[in-house]
Image (cartoon, rainbow, N blue to C red):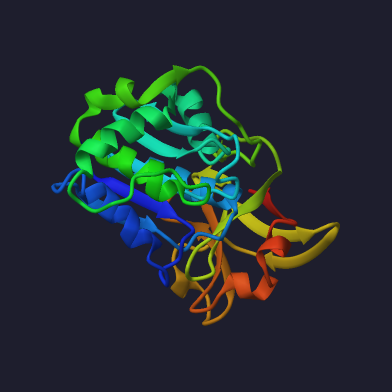
Amino acid sequence: MGIIYLLTDFGDSDPYVAVLKSRILNINRKARIVDLSHKLKKFDIEFSSWFLLYSFLNLENDAIFTCVVDPGVGTERKNLIVQIEKRFFILPDNGLISLVLRECQKKRIFYRFYQIQEQNLLQLLKKYYKNSGINIQISNTFHGRDIFAPTAGLLSKDQHILPKISKRIEMIEGKHFSSIIEIDLKTFLGSSITGNIVYVDHFGNLFTNLKIHNPYDKFLTLFIIKGKKIVLEIKKISKTFQDVKENDFLFYIGSFGFIEIARNQGSAFEYFGDYQNIKKLEVLIQISK
């Protein structure tokens, strides 16, 4: 099996991430583990679901994604394995994978749902952790350690173990987050496109849900609107950050193919204050020939 990618909101000041890795490596010493991020906005499933979508669109097709953004840990929500062709996503049933599944539906990509059977998992872990000194249990507050990471370790060692630790289910929890709006300006007849800001990266760049093809065929102006008030206007799409002066705003097609809003060597996010404010903003792109 391929690389195990870890995605959490745990941060890097506590032992939580190291504990996840130890649980995986105690099962499969040869596992290859890559940290996608551990600095997602705490408890924010919507922003995290966009990060997971970007990862899904850009990483290899035989990976294992272990995703722990889980404000409902310890409740009756299910613990899932979602198989998407050759990929496996191990995560709570809280809507985190909603956008990935929407993309699969659009592209007719095969997927299946499995619910992890905790008691079956515990029985297997007794074998693998026998001489490790690890106390095998499932706590109410750390399913990343007790369920998700060990499951990733088992699947990385042997995919055929899937029916031993899980059962097929037909439905999971879905969330109605903003979806991708994809438009080709060569054929688009409208005069404007409206979208949302859905993610903020380390540099304070604002990612939108707008995926626009052939954006340089027409003249574009971007407005950021709060309520009915225009709070920012950018009069021309850029190709690089150096198209504008230092600390000026720009918008452009980002490396993931979406419209992004930034400040050259500055933070667009800091200009708007905080995440709750960001979620209230609307992005309007006006199109003229």
Q: Position of residue 183 (x, y in %)?
A: 57, 38
In terms of depth relative to the viewer, which is nearer, 148 or 279? 148
- Left or right of 152 on screen, residue 74: right
Disc tally is: 0
Is 38 situated above or below 214? below
Question: Residue at the location (48% across, 79% down)?
Answer: 265
- Left or right of 131 on screen, residue 145: right
Q: Position of residue 192 (x, y in %)?
A: 70, 45
As drawn, which residue projects farthest toward the bottom? 246
Question: Residue at the location (69% across, 72% down)?
Answer: 273
In terms of depth relative to the viewer, which is nearer, 220 or 73? 73
As drawn, which residue projects farthest toward the right? 228
Question: Residue at the location (33% across, 38% down)?
Answer: 151
Q: Is residue 285 visible?
A: yes
Q: Position of residue 83 (x, y in %)?
A: 37, 27
- Image quarter where the N terminus lies is top left
Is 111 situated above or below 278? above
Quadrant assignment, res 261: bottom right
Q: Position of residue 13 (x, y in %)?
A: 42, 72
Is 70 situated above or below 228? above
In terms of depth relative to the viewer, which is nearer, 227 or 35? 35
- Left or right of 214 on screen, residue 56: left
Q: Is residue 61 visible?
A: no
